[in-house]
Image: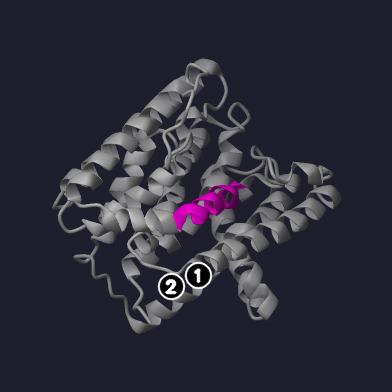
C-alpha cells in the first residue's frame, strides 16, 4: 500500500474546515446592511481566505490521481460510489428541506440542479471521474513541452470564459477537456504543481507574495463594489475568478512544499489527521443540516460576527465530525460518506 503524503492530507484537513468557514461567513456577508461595517469586513476577509479550499480539493484529486495508472474497473467503482452518495444525500436533503426547511424540491430536477446547493461539488466531480482514465493516459503520454503548451491553452480558455461572463456571453464551443467551468482546470493544475513541486518558483517569497497580492486585490475590489452597490458583491468570490485561482494555486504549492515536501507529523498527530480526513467527505455532506438549524433560529445581526463565525465554524466541524465518525462505524455509513 502506497504511503500517505501528509502534505496533501494537511491540505485536505485545512480545506474541509475552510469549506465550513465559507458557508458560515457567507451567511454574515449576505447580511450586509444588517450587520456593522466592521463585522462585514471581517466576514468578507474570512470568506475570501477560505475560498482557496474548494480549488485545493480539486487539485488534490489531480495530484493523487492524474499521475496513476488504474484499471477501468477501479474507475467504474469510484464513479458508482459518487453516484450512490449523490442519490442518497439528495433524498436525505429532499426530505430535510420539505419537512424542516419547508422548501419542497421536484425530483424531476435532479439531473439539472442539486437538491441542496453545496451538493454541486458532486455534480462537478462525477463528470471529471467519468473521463479521468482518459486524462491519466493523456498526462502519461505528454512530455514537458506538451504539458507547458497544454497549460497555456487551458489557462487562456479559463481566462476567456471568466471574462466573457461579465458581458453575459460565452464561447460558442467550449475548449474540450476544460469546458465552460474551471473545475477540471484545477485538477490539471494540481497534477502539474505536485509533479514539479520542487522545481516551480523555488523558495517561499514569490508564491507567498503572489498569494497576498491576489487576496488583497480581490478583497479590495469586492469591498469597493459592495460599498458602491449597497449589497454584498459575490462575482469575485466565484471559483472561476483568475485571482482566486492563482491564490489557491500558490497556497497549494506552498503547502505541498512544506518541510521540503516531506511533512511528517508525529504518530499521534497522524492518527488525528487520518481520523479527520477520513471523515472529511461526510462532514462536507452533513454540516449544512446543522447550519440550517442555526440560520433558522439566529439572525446575523443578533450576535457579533467577530465571535459567531469562529465559534459556529468550530462547532459545526466538531458536531459534524462526531456524527460522521459514529455513522461510519457501520458498513452502510462508510458507503454513503
Q: Residue at x 45, y 56 (%)?
A: 132
Q: Name the foreground residue: 308 vs 262.
A: 262
At which x and y percent is residue 294? 70, 51
Q: Residue at x 20, y 52 (%)?
A: 143
Judging by the rendered image, the residue that carries numbered circle 1 is 74
Disc 1 crowd rating (10 Å Cα; few below 14, some 14-19, many 20+) is few
| Relative to 248, residue 322 above or below | below
Q: Residue at x 21, y 66 (%)?
A: 259
Q: Name the foreground residue: 168 vs 21.
A: 168
Left or right position of 331 against 232: right
Q: Alpha carbon of mark 2 to alpha carbon of mark 1: how far? A: 25 Å
| Residue 130 falls within the magenta-colored stretch | yes
Judging by the rendered image, the residue that carries numbered circle 2 is 273
Mark 1, secondary structure of its residue: helix
| Residue 259 falls within the magenta-colored stretch | no
Give the number of the disc on residue 192.
none
Left or right position of 106 against 224: right
What are the residue bounds of the magenta stretch?
120-132
At which x and y percent is residue 44? 47, 37
Amino acid at each position: 500500500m502506497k504511503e500517505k503524503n501528509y502534505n496533501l492530507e494537511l491540505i485536505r484537513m485545512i480545506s474541509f474546515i475552510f469549506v465550513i468557514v465559507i458557508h458560515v461567513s457567507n451567511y454574515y456577508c449576505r447580511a450586509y446592511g444588517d450587520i456593522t461595517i466592521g463585522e462585514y469586513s471581517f466576514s468578507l476577509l474570512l470568506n475570501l481566505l477560505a475560498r482557496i479550499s474548494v480549488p485545493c480539493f480539486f487539485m488534490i484529486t489531480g495530484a493523487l490521481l492524474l499521475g496513476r495508472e488504474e484499471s477501468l474497473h477501479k474507475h467504474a467503482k469510484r464513479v458508482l460510489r459518487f453516484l450512490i452518495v449523490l442519490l442518497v444525500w439528495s433524498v436525505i436533503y429532499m426530505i430535510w428541506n420539505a419537512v424542516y426547511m419547508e422548501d419542497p424540491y421536484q425530483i424531476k430536477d435532479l439531473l439539472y440542479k442539486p437538491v441542496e446547493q453545496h451538493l454541486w461539488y458532486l455534480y462537478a466531480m462525477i463528470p471529471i471521474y467519468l473521463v479521468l482514465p482518459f486524462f491519466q493516459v493523456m498526462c502519461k503520454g505528454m512530455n514537458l513541452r506538451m504539458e507547458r503548451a497544454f497549460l497555456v491553452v487551458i489557462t487562456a480558455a479559463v481566462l476567456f470564459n471568466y471574462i466573457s461572463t461579465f458581458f453575459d456571453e460565452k464561447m460558442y464551443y467550449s475548449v474540450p477537456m476544460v469546458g465552460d467551468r474551471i473545475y477540471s482546470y484545477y485538477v490539471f493544475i494540481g497534477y502539474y504543481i505536485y509533479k514539479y513541486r520542487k522545481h516551480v518558483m523555488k523558495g517561499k517569497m514569490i508564491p507567498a507574495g503572489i498569494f497576498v497580492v491576489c487576496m488583497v486585490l480581490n478583497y479590495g475590489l469586492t469591498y469597493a463594489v459592495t460599498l458602491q452597490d449597497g449589497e454584498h458583491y459575490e462575482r469575485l468570490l466565484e471559483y472561476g475568478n483568475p485571482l482566486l485561482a492563482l491564490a489557491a494555486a500558490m497556497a497549494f504549492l506552498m503547502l505541498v512544499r512544506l518541510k521540503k515536501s516531506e511533512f511528517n507529523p508525529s504518530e499521534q498527530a497522524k492518527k488525528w489527521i487520518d481520523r479527520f480526513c477520513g471523515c472529511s467527505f461526510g462532514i462536507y455532506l452533513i454540516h449544512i443540516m446543522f447550519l440550517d438549524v442555526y440560520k433558522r433560529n439566529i439572525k446575523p445581526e443578533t450576535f457579533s460576527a467577530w465571535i459567531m463565525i469562529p465559534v459556529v465554524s468550530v462547532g459545526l466541524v466538531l458536531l459534524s465530525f462526531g456524527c460522521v465518525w459514529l455513522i461510519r462505524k457501520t458498513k452502510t455509513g462508510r458507503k454513503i460518506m
